[in-house]
Image: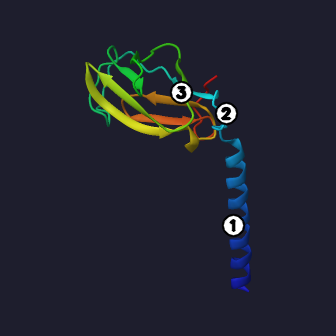
Amino acid sequence: MGSIHFSILLAALLVARGAAQTSSDTAKPASQNPSATGTVCVLPNSPDPPTRISPGGEYNPATLTVSVDKLPPISWPHKQTSKIENLTLDGRHLIVLRSDGKHIQSFWFRFSDYQDAKLCVYFDGYQGVQFGDKHTTYWCRCK
């Protein structure tokens, strides 16, 4: 009797997994459209220096910048969200954080790894860089 319940549970999990993959595949941005572009929203952080050491090391909020690929860096916002727009959906992109001219953290991402072409990046000095879309994070509200 126990093996029958296990078999039914296993079958249900496989069906659910297949359905989840199908829905996530259809929700991904259409990279076949050459005019389609993506956006990274930079969410504001505190203008006050962190009181704890972040995973990226100490940093100065007044000089914190973010850049994507070879685009010019922008100052990290403290009041309103900033957008880095017109990024290609194909290929990978490099995000780099700097403060006082020093490298803090960097990472690569691909739009194809997410369900939306609007992604968010957040840095609070305590948890390091957080990155995602509205489907994988509760705090991403990029418009």
Nearer the observer, disc 3 or disc 2? 2
Tag on residue 14?
Answer: 1
Please state the horizontal and vertical placement of residue 139, each as a whole percent of the image.
57, 31
Q: In this orientation, which residue lies closer to the viewer: 15 or 33?
A: 33
Eyeballing the image, is 82 above or below 88? above
Q: In this orientation, which residue lies closer to the viewer: 35 or 101?
A: 35
Eyeballing the image, is 4 above or below 75? below
Q: CA distance from mark 3 to mark 1?
A: 36 Å
Q: Quadrant of the C terminus?
A: top right
Residue projecting furthest to the bottom? 1
Q: Amino acid at mark 2?
A: Asn
From the image, tell me which residue sits under label 3: 87
Q: CA distance from mark 1 to mark 2?
A: 32 Å
Residue at horizontal 63 percent and vertical 37 percent from the top: 31
Q: In this orientation, which residue lies closer to the viewer: 141 or 22?
A: 22
Badge 3 or badge 2: first in the primary sequence: 2
Residue at horizontal 71 percent and vertical 78 percent from the top: 7
Residue at horizontal 49 percent and vertical 35 percent from the top: 131
Q: Secondary structure at mark 3?
A: strand
Q: Secondary structure at mark 1?
A: helix
Eyeballing the image, is 70 above or below 77? below
* One can see residue 127 in this view: no
Q: What crowding class fits label 3: few (fewer than 14 Cα within 10 Å), some (14-19), or many (20 or more)?
A: some
Nearer the observer, disc 1 or disc 2? 2
Please state the horizontal and vertical placement of residue 124, each as a whole percent of the image.
41, 28
Q: Looking at the rendering, which quadrant does residue 133 occupy?
A: top right
Q: Amino acid at mark 3?
A: Leu
Residue at horizontal 30 percent and vertical 30 percent from the top: 104
From the image, tell me which residue sits under label 2: 33
Tag on residue 50?
Answer: none
Q: Looking at the rendering, which quadrant does residue 17 occupy?
A: bottom right
